[in-house]
Image (cartoon, helix red, strand yellow):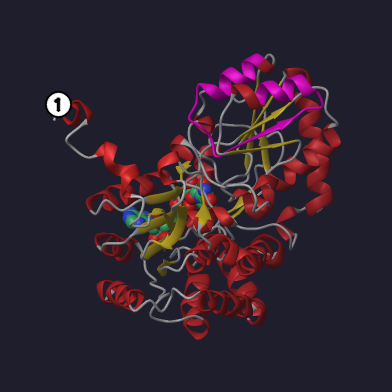
Amino acid sequence: MEMQVVQRARETFLTRRSRPLEFRVQQLKSLQRMITDRQGEIATALKQDINRYDTPLLELIGLENEISLAVSKLAQWDAPRPVEKSLLTISDQVYIQPEPLGVVLIIGAWNYPWALTLQPLVGAIAAGNAAVVKPSELSEYSASLLKALLPRYLDQELYPVVCGGVSETQELLRQRFDHIFYTGNSTVGKLVMEAAARHLTPVTLELGGKSPCYIDKDVDLRVACRRITWGKFVNCGQTCIAPDYILCEPSIQNRVVEGIRQTLLEFYGPDPKSSPDYGRIINQRHFNRVMALLDGYTAALGGQSDSSQRYIAPTVVKDVPPYARLMQEEIFGPLLPIVTISDVDDAIHFISEREKPLAIYVFSSNKKVIKRMLAETTSGGVTVNDVMMHYTLNSLPFGGVGQSGTGRYHGKHTFDQFSHHRACLVKSLGMERVNMPRYPPQNHQKARR
Ligand code: NAD
């Protein structure tokens, strides 16, 4: 089944149907129409999957921006780009021509099932590819709605949706693709890369990890805590670039906890469980995993849970030892550990001796501290004095580095990721005299004659 879908996509790609710019624009506009027409159904699916309350803000606005940018810039992105010439090619055409890679595979994750599946698809279509879309089986309502809707709006042969779990994904991964774009955890990321290697297929891996959040002692804690609380607890902590843990000096730790407490009250009221704005954990396995991380700790805030609803309260844990279990793996849930460090050097050291994170957040009003943090750490992306907002700019490449991923996307970066940048030199058959020095016999032999 999967094999036939991929084969059909390849055969259709080879007819060059996906190549004309007008076709790509028309498909992108149709995708936009799907989002507009079906917003209500999408919102219901998200509510069923993950108790998402804020569908347009969290999933669809970014996606719509990506579509309208691609529609308006496509001709420019796709145009040949003349580059510098050498003396020998001075009268020739020298340029870079983007061209589609072929048939690509997009494997999405469940935490933002629409954005993480369709944003890569926007770039794949814009670049002229065929794309097989594999949504996550964990967000099952969104996955089956996507499978029902996409063929009604997009070319069915070029952009098929394959649903299913591990075995279907593994079957897909045995097929040959021209690029694989995977979003999810790093364990599966390794399997994807291994499967891709068998066909020498390039990959984009959008993975996760522990994104640190450093709070300097001189900041306006009221503002910092509001921003951090939003980023950590939105979607119940299930965001790849959520601040995973806080680093701060012991002298401000209690004030940070107090700032978060006040903000939680402001956002979700005295009982987050009954707030329509607070989410749930995706499934029982993840609920058990997150609760197990909390084992043995006393929460400074929150700590309550209800397994029947997969509810875990927004939870803050103080004075977490640097090598505690909570600090070993990505939390991906509403638990926020605070680790105290002695100063900015200590914070930099703490971050640098761990894997390169997907994001780093720095809260400080001290320019020197900001400069040092930027210069002496590395991560996929960084936002200073806020969290997650670098993700919203499609001028910035989004992606990880090292263990947090490879490749980048958003805006033109997605188009580039799904394009081959072909090196083109177009010469004339004239001016042959200029070429004589490179032909044998070389000068010394010519001189001997
Ligand atoms: P997931 O369980 O939905 O898995 C992602 C995809 O992998 C799914 O389509 C699934 O079918 C497939 N899959 C699962 N097991 C497989 C296997 N054994 N073989 C082949 N395919 C398999 O999502 P997840 O991994 O739980 O997502 C959470 C992780 O994703 C977190 O680590 C998070 O940080 C990361 N993430 C990263 C980004 C990003 O943009 N960098 C975005 C969202 C999530």
On the image, numbered disc 1 is attached to which residue? 448
Q: Quadrant of the N terminus?
A: bottom left
Question: SS of the residue at dot 1?
Answer: helix
**For residue 344: magenta?**
no
Query: In the rendering, at what x and y percent does residue 171 appear?
Result: 26, 64
Q: Which quadrant of the structure image shows residue 72?
A: bottom right
Span of residues in magenta: 345-373
Which residue occupies the extreme bottom position in the image? 152
**How many callouts does the rendering have?**
1
Residue 229 appears left or right of 304: right
- Can the viewer see residue 427? yes
- Of residues 154 and 86, the one drawn nearer to the viewer in this rendering: 86
| Residue plotted at (54% across, 36% down) | 210
Which residue occupies the extreme left position in the image? 449
Disc 1 Cβ-to-ligand 1 distance below 8 Å: no
Asked if residue 335 is positioned above or below residue 275 in the image, the reply reads: above
| Residue plotted at (32% across, 45% down) | 433
Residue 431 appears left or right of 306: left
Query: In the rendering, at what x and y percent does residue 439 appear?
Result: 22, 40
